[in-house]
Amino acid sequence: MFKFLQYRARAAEYGELAKSSSGKDDTRKFEKLQDSLAWRADNEQVLANQYLDAVNGGETERLRGAALAAEEERVLRCLGAAVIMQWNSLPTTLQREIFDTAGSVGTLLDTVALREQIARFLHKHRHDTDPGTI
């Protein structure tokens, strides 16, 4: 049972004792205890809610970040496809700049392998986008 529920249960018990008490002093004492426990229950509930928000907030941010990453990946794929479709019509200097830039994306250890993969891809598809070549 959550702590705030325990405080609320005890506050309710003191509320019943205040109603059934015979003297004003006892009634006041039980009402003060009831108020104190109700205040603690409210504070504990706020803390519990803040904890859940903090825990779930990280998950929400992670999911939002994943959605943004997926959207950006789609945009980058579309841009990359558009560049490849126009590759043969690009000036050679621009082709080299794009190749060098693309080959340098990522970690230094992967650069050589990535450049080789890009070169193989471009060589394999060099005539795919040229309408005059069959």
Image: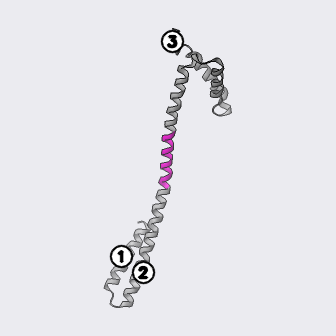
Tell me the number on the disc at residue 131: 3
Q: Which residue is the site of mark 1?
A: 12
Q: Which quarter of the figure is the N terminus placed in?
A: bottom left
Q: Residue 8: percent from the left, percent from the top?
A: 39, 72
The residue drawn where x is 46% and y is 69% is: 43
Q: Is residue 20 above or below residue 41?
A: below
- Of residues 7 and 129, which is closer to you in this image? 129
Furthest toward the left, the residue is 20
State which region is magenta. Answer: 55-68
Q: What amino acid is found at the position of numbered circle 3 in the picture?
A: Pro
Q: Determine whether the residue tagged by mark 3 lies in a helix, strand or loop.
A: loop
Q: Nearer the viewer, mark 2 or mark 3?
A: 3
Q: What amino acid is found at the position of numbered circle 1 in the picture?
A: Ala
- Of residues 24 and 90, which is closer to you in this image? 90
Q: CA distance from mark 1 to mark 2?
A: 10 Å
Q: Is residue 31 left or right of residue 103?
A: left
Q: Residue 6: percent from the left, percent from the top?
A: 41, 71
- Of residues 49 and 10, which is closer to you in this image? 49
Is 61 inside the magenta-drawn segment?
yes
Q: CA distance from mark 1 to mark 3?
A: 83 Å
Q: Determine whether the residue tagged by mark 1 lies in a helix, strand or loop.
A: helix
Answer with mark 1 or mark 2, whichever residue precedes in sequence. Answer: 1
Q: Please tell me how crowded label 3 is: few (under 14), some (14-19), or many (20+) other residues with Cα within 10 Å.
A: few
Answer with mark 1 or mark 3, whichever residue precedes in sequence. Answer: 1
Q: Determine whether the residue tagged by mark 2 lies in a helix, strand or loop.
A: helix
Tell me the number on the disc at residue 33: 2
Tell me the number on the disc at residue 70: none
Q: Is residue 110 above or below residue 44?
A: above
Q: Is residue 16 left or right of residue 91?
A: left
- The picture quadrant where one finds residue 5 is bottom left
